[in-house]
Amino acid sequence: MDRAQIVHDNFRKRVAAGTLPPGNAPTRDLSPQTAVAIYRAQVLSRALDITSRAMQKAGQGFYTIGSSGHEGMAAVARALRPDDMAFLHYRDAAFQIARADQVPGQRIAWDMLLSFACSSEDPTSGGRHKVLGSKALMIPPQTSTIASHLPKAVGAAYSIGAARRHAPEHQQLADDGIVMCSFGDASANHSTAQGAFNTAGWTSVQSTPLPLLFVCEDNGIGISTKTPKGWIEASMSARPGIRYFKADGLDLYATHAVAQQAADYVRRRRKPAFLHIGTVRLYGHAGADVPTTYLSKAEVESDEANDPLLHSVRLLEQADALSRDAALKIYEETCARVERIRAEVVTRPHLQTGADVAASLIPPKRACAASNGPSAEARAKIFGSDLRAMSDPQPMSRLINWALSDLMLEHDEIVMMGEDVGRKGGVYGVTQKLQQRFGADRMVDTLLDEQSILGLAIGMGHNGFVPMPEIQFLAYLHNAEDQLRGEAATLSFFSDGQFANPMVLRIAGLGYQKGFGGHFHNDNSLAVLRDIPGIIIACPSDGAEAAMMMREAVRLAREEQRVVVFVEPIALYPMRDLHAVKDGGWMRHYPAPDQSISLGEVGQHGAGGDLAIVTYGNGRYLSTQAQAELEARGIKTRIVDLRWLAPLPAEALIQATKGCKHVLIVDECRTTGSQSEALMALFSEASDIPAARIAAGDCFIATGPAYAATLPSKESILAAALELVGEGS
């Protein structure tokens, strides 16, 4: 027999017979009305679990990780305010149901069953996933969270104190609010979780406000791998900067009391706490999982005998809040009501087309207060002597610095964060003076953990800020890529556009650093970014364009709530000369603050019709060097700079190369997985112009004199161009 049916039958029989599990007497902190409300939420969670499994068997539902055994989270919900943002573990239906009881106008059973059925009317995801979440309940949806939501919970908690000091236009969280995130004991071992705990403690011991409640639901097992007894308490009870609380999640009274203490501590002290709740897991991990294949029958039955609903019935009876007969009646009526709703929900519409599914991939635009830009007086105060230097051409690093200064001056909600961005001014000096100009609140020096840097940005985006995190080197992003793929880029998709994670992620990257750092500092692959739906990838090639593209990137994040990755070519930061020493050919004047380059707008340099070189970043610099020699040979050449690598500006590229006899793609990324693959496909499918490509070798970059041996060069570009146009040797 299915374990869910066994648990269901056992509950009915044992409540009717009065054979309830023993336990402590109820505490007296809960009113009878609140205690019964918690029980009703627990029962509805259980009924929904039972029905979801039946829906899957009938082909009416599609995902059945349930919450049975974790119903104690309903008591945690009652210990918090409904405006406290909550990032939930996937077993927390009882929490969401209990919170819905505190917010008028909710139809929680109907809404959750729509989600089970993947109906397009599901108010959370629009039919894209069976997922917990609700805009009205301040619960951003999570999918199969294996601790990936913890870093952004740290960021959201940090944002509350930051908003007290600099209130953003689109602030979402109350100044006295707290943030809660929940997870399982197995997930607590994930490196992402450990990084979040470390970041929270690191922040707390520096007396920086961080009103965050971690809630660990400890059922002792992760799918089939057991958690050692006492492991969570031993590893978390003495964590620096984090206060530890422990509760029996089978006891709704005790859970509420301890959760209330923990929440009060966090709210009053503005410091993080860790609430460790003991639970059981009923039915196994998910619908297809059979726990008796890896647990003994005795172990499975032991957990079933400790069904938290049985404990709740006992406690309510002992507290004179609800008789056993009334408790059983609530259970039967709730199960019947859920089945009635199911019969109607399965008739509701579903997503039909690819366009339907992708409709929420791009977040909706939001109205922002108009700005005329910073005043001349404000700019004079911020820039000082730099204003005089703006009359002279400058390298890229300085022009990006000035663009960031103008943007931060114009938009108070911009906050930058990263290792060394503040006091030091960045590894390459790009953010020099910004902390002096705007303060440590807006130029946040973080600990060395890329997941925490991106989590801080994502969390602050939840509270109306426009975060601009920095990853020092492109290769370091791989430590934290899932914060983009699994969190920032998917939130709008899985919330039907109700939540978004706007940001401009700055990454110093790409190759051509002379003899420094090898493949960790000269990483030349963007494939991991190009694979993520919905994000924008920008890569400038000179300082003036970098400044104008940065302004567009901030507009996209601020007004359109987009995730923008701004890749800055390290080798071009200091570049001054183009053809000869001290010719100053790659320096540019600072463009006026109102000038920008729109998303999808490509650059064209030259009008030659013999050859179009399509490139970006360092490739444009090298191609410009080659262009001079090609022109000297009588080959009329134009250079088309992508600027925006994703989404690929396909139509603009076709237009920019129209009338050319040949197209040469120059890509500094590795041949496999590079932009050149997509570009070759584009010109093959949408143009009849002969095309060829030159890209980096499928190899890491060496340190020392051979730093550029695997990369395109002026010479290799020239040779490829001559061969393409038929003038090769």
Image (cartoon, rainbow, N blue to C red):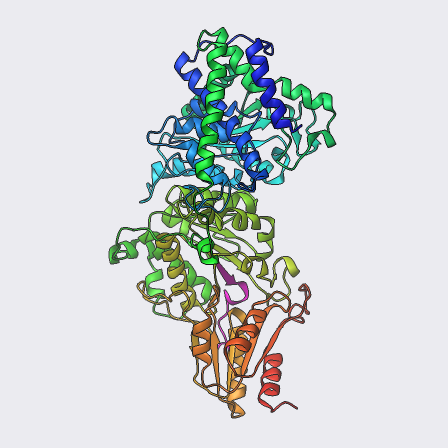
Where 332 sits versus 190, above or below?
above
- 319 or 560: which is nearer to us? 319
Q: Nearer the viewer, residue 60 or 95?
A: 60
Residue 213: in sight, yes or no? no
In-image side of 612 versus 367 (left or right): right
Indicate whether 240 appears above or below 473: above
Answer yes or no: is residue 558 visible.
Answer: yes
Q: Is residue 654 magenta?
A: no
Residue 194 place in picture, x, y as percent: 60, 36
Looking at the image, residue 711 sits to the left or right of residue 169; the answer is: right
Q: How many marks do you count on the picture?
A: 0
Q: Residue at x 59, y 65 (%)?
A: 511
Query: How far across and how far down the image is residue 506, in percent?
Result: 48, 56
- Position in image of residue 266 (x %, y %): 45, 26
Residue 232 vertical placement versus 19 (above, below): below
**Boundaries of the magenta span:** 566-583
Q: Is residue 705 above or below residue 201?
A: below
Question: Which of the 4 image quarters holds residue 671?
Answer: bottom right
Q: Quadrant of the C terminus?
A: bottom right
Q: Closer to the camera, 255 or 171?
A: 255
Q: Position of residue 637 (x, y in %)?
A: 49, 85
